[in-house]
Amino acid sequence: MELNKIAIYMKDDEFLNSFFESNRVLIFSRKDGVWIQTESVDYCITAQMPIGEIRRRARTLTELLGDCRVIAGLEMLGIPFSVFDMAGYHIFTVTEINSTIFEEILADIENGDAQNRMREEIIKNAKPVETDVPGMYFLDLILLQTECPEISSKKALRDFLESTPFLELKLICKHLPPWLELDPKIHVELVSATEPVTAIITKTRD
């Protein structure tokens, strides 16, 4: 993806408009810190066209824009939005075009990418961490699920409990996952039964 190109859909090069009301896409490129118009692509896609035709023409337009993966304008809805989104475009709504707006768009993308990378790292390492005391682990499940709600208690704990040799795990959670109490291989001691729940988990003796 090129982060030095931004496509702007407009009407007759004169003013910003909605995607369906526009008829031209201007591509601006950043060269040596300066934004300049480098390409222009005409198109005709209206809301009155059959759905299949709108989709076909929108796909063709995504291809005509080459390696640019950022598009902005006054409004893009419905099928065109879906087509550009599926093609991997970053889609922005803007009410004016200038170098400041372009830089803000790229900053938003870079910040979003950084947040995505951070989330991926959190998900990859969604498991208890060892404390300064060898064999003693800690996990704040509340904090983890606040950042990544899609991570279940089983996803965060099951593999750790089955494959990690540990002496003790201190778990902070909103409520004790029922499956933990049913696991015969571990012992759960409630330190605090009210939210935030604190539990000490150890392995049962063979």
Image (cartoon, rainbow, N blue to C red):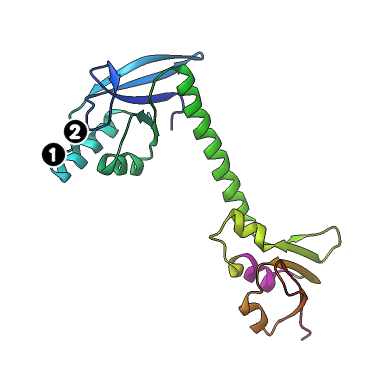
Please tell me which residue lies in front, 174 or 60. 174
| Rendered position, 202 above or below 99 | below
* Residue 191 counted in the magenta span: no
Asked whether the residues under the numbered discs 1 and 2 touch, taking CB atoms below 8 Å apart as contact, a structural biologist would say yes
Residue 47, compared with residue 40, is above or below; it is below
* In the image: residue 22, left or right of residue 190: left
Crowding near the residue tagged with mark 1, few <14, some 14–19, many ≥20 C-alpha atoms within 10 Å: few
Tell me which amino acid carries mark 1.
Met
Residue 10, percent from left and from top: 28, 23
Instruction: In the displayed orientation, state which residue is furthest to the front.
Output: 194
Q: Nearer the viewer, residue 145 or 120?
A: 145
- Would you name the residue on which mark 1 appears? 49
Magenta segment main secondary structure: helix
Q: Residue at x 61, y 79 (%)?
A: 179
Describe residue 39's horizontal placement relative to residue 193 as left or right. left
Please, what is the three-letter code of the amino acid marked with disc 2? Answer: Ile
Which residue in the structure is indicated by mark 2?
45
Q: Secondary structure at mark 1?
A: loop
Q: Work out how far the residue at label 1 is from the one at label 2, CA to CA, in angstroms.
A: 7 Å
The answer to whether residue 157 of the structure is visible from this angle is yes
Residue numbers of the magenta segment:
156-164
Classify 10 Å Cα crowding around label 2: few (below 14), some (14-19), many (20 and above): some
Classify residue 97 by image quadrant.
top left
Residue positioned 29% across, 19% down in the render: 15
- The quadrant holding residue 81 is top left
